[in-house]
Image (tube, rainbow, N blue to C red):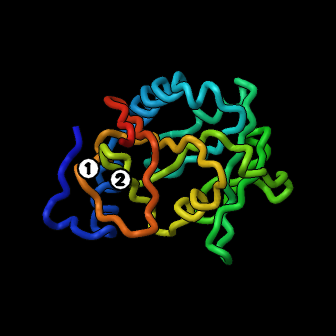
Amino acid sequence: MAGKISGGASSKSDLRKEVVAARDALAPQERRDLSARITQKLLPIDAYRNARCVLAYMSMGSEFDTSLFVADVLTSGKALCLPRVDRATRRLEVRRVENADGDLTPGVWGIREPRTSCPPADIESIDFVLLPGVAFTPRCERLGYGGGFYDRLISDFTKRPALVAAAFSLQVRSQIPLAAGDQRIDLVVTEDSCYRAG
C-alpha cells in the first residue's frame, strides 16, 4: 500500500532522506528475501521475456538487489547493457557486458560499472530498461537520486523501450514532488504489487 508523504517531506531532498533511511533500516536478510520475491515477479513480465537487449544497473547500498536479475539476463541469452557514469557531461554511457564479474569495476560513488574496454551499446537496440530510483507513486512517477542521469537517458531514446523499476513497497508513496524534466515510467514492481502507468 502506498504511504503518504509526511508533512516534513515536502521537498525532494527530504523525501529522499526519509525513504533511504527506511530502506536502510531493513535487515540485510529481509532485503535479500524481498529482492528475490521482486525478481520472481520481474522475470515473467512479457516485455522482459520478449526483450533481446536489456539495460540494467548494479545495485548499491540498500537498493533492491539486482544481482539475480542481471544473472538471468545473461543466462537467458539476452544482451546485457550497463551504465557507466560520465561525471564531466553528467550523462550515462551505456556499454555491453558479457561477464557480470570480470567486466565490472568500481566507479563513481562505488557503483560497479563496465570497464572502459567494454564496447559501447547502441541504445536504439535496447527494448527493456530496469531503472533505479528512490521513491515511486502508483502512477509510476519516479524520484531518482537527484543527478538527472536517467531522465536524460530516457529522453535520448528515439523509440522508447519498456521502462520498469523494482522497489520495496516502502518506497511507494501516494505522491512525490516532481519537476518538468522528471520522466514517468511504465511499471513499478514491488514484493506486493505491480503498478502500471495509466
Q: Residue at position x 81%, y 59% from top?
A: 116
Q: Observer-nearest residue: 181 or 194? A: 181
Question: Could you tell which of marks 2 and 1 lies nearer the N-terminus?
Answer: 2
According to the picture, the residue beneath numbered tag 1 turns out to be: 173
Q: Residue at position x 71%, y 38% from top?
A: 53
Q: Quadrant of the C terminus?
A: top left
- Image vertical order of residue 129 relative to residue 69, above or below: below
Side of 105 relative to 117 (left or right): left
- The type of residue carrying mark 2 is Ala
Residue lying at the far bottom in this picture: please name it: 88
According to the picture, the residue beneath numbered tag 2 turns out to be: 135
Q: In which quarter of the image is the N terminus?
A: top left
Residue 82 image point, x, y percent: 68, 49
Residue 79 image point, x, y percent: 75, 36
Side of 84 relative to 13 (left or right): right
**Discs 2, 1 touching: Cβ within 8 Å:** yes
Q: Residue at position x 57%, y 31% from top?
A: 47
Q: Residue at position x 78%, y 46% from top?
A: 96
Number of other residues with Cα within 10 Å of mark 2, as a class: few under 14, some 14 to 19, many 20 or more: many
As helix, strand or loop, the secondary structure at mark 2 comes to strand
Number of other residues with Cα within 10 Å of mark 1, as a class: few under 14, some 14 to 19, many 20 or more: many
- The type of residue carrying mark 1 is Arg
As helix, strand or loop, the secondary structure at mark 1 comes to loop
Quadrant of the image occupied by residue 77:
top right
Residue 166 image point, x, y percent: 45, 40
